[in-house]
Image: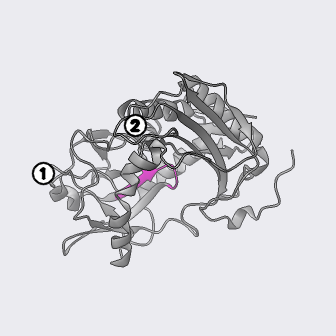
Amino acid sequence: MEKKNIDWSNLGFGYIQTDKRFVSNYKDGAWDEGVLTEDATVVINECAGVLQYAQTIFEGMKAYTTKDGKIVVFRPDLNAARMADSARRLEMPVYPEDKFVEAIAKTVEANAAYVPPYGSGASLYLRPYMFGSNPVIGVKPADEYQFRVFATPVGPYFKGGAKPLTLKVSDYDRAAPCGTGHIKAGLNYAMSLHAIVTAHEEGYDENMYLDAATRTKVEETGGANFLFITKDNKVVTPKSDSILPSITRRSLMYVAKEYLGLEVEEREVFIDEVKDFAECGLCGTAAVISPVGKIVNHGEEISFPSGMEKMGPTIQKLYDTLTGIQMGTIEAPEGWIKVIC
């Protein structure tokens, strides 16, 4: 299989249309078998549920070329389960989890020529998503839905290496208690756009959101979970019912304990104790771990001992181990890697 003529080493993190995408429709109470199509357009009614009431959910994941030349996907079963949870919360029909994994595999295999080669630092980003497609004018769930998966080759999220970020404690709330912060709904990201644009205008890379009820506890950023490293090398991650359960975070916590022998803890993290941590990172599909060098809380600067030049030592070990598992240079736990071809 011949790869596409793409300058893999200079890819940015953006959309490039590939050859095929998977499409399945839900109508009259059932999903159809779904097909691969070359048509990248979506045609829906002007009154479609997604346009009127934002009834849409999505996932994000990657396919990689491993050291031995195989094309693999990382833990797609967890994406399938999380999307099912998202669907239930927004009163959408669950796309069967086994069919979800099959759709991912079909999409990757059909676009194998776009999977970047091993060592390029690039990958094939996969975006499964679902939306209400039939006309809905009253406030209620749609009756018909479309599930799609497209793929696009992407470069590293941070070109030239991951320099530590500067965050601000946001004046906005990301998610309400008992709201939708724990699912991957499009509406969560729409409401974060003003806050991130404002942060960028003020010279910050991202926002740190606190819990909406008390504004004393760390939750997450607009699109990533937090990991903190204590001065005695314990890995701590915030616990909250309104945090999105990151698959990358879950994997990193396992790696910390089982591969690196570190103590791990998921608990409430108060903003007042952040100054006492040695390292801080943001974890998610796009960048795996992004180091944080400084957090500004309404004029108070919290600078981590790991500094503003590079990842802290423990976060670097976590990053190297998880990416090694994904790329096939470190043996993966059973079930983590799905070989496509």
Front residue (pair 254, 28): 28
Front residue (pair 198, 9): 198
On screen, residue 30 above or below 165: above
Find residue 10 and report its horizontal and vertical position in percent. 69, 67
On screen, residue 294 above or below 125: below
Quadrant of res 21:
top right
Crowding at dot 1, Cα within 10 Å, few <14 / some 14-19 / many 20+, comes out as few
Quadrant of the rendering where the N terminus is positioned: top right
Horizontal placement of 212 versus 141: left or right? left
Quadrant of the rendering where the C terminus is positioned: top right
Residue interval drawn in magenta: 280-287
Counting labels gives: 2
Question: Which of marks 2 and 1 precedes in the sequence?
Answer: 1
Q: Kindly identify which residue carries mark 1.
A: 214
Residue 71 showing in the rendered view: no
Quadrant of res 206:
bottom left
Residue at 39% in and 69% down: 205
Crowding at dot 2, Cα within 10 Å, few <14 / some 14-19 / many 20+, comes out as some
Q: Does 284 appear in magenta?
A: yes
Q: Does 85 appear in magenta?
A: no
Residue at 51% in and 38% down: 134
Horizontal placement of 164 versus 341: left or right? left
Q: Residue furthest top?
A: 29
Going by the numbered disc 2, the residue's amino acid type is Lys
Q: Kindly identify which residue carries mark 2.
A: 257
Front residue (pair 32, 171): 32
Residue at 60% in and 30% down: 101
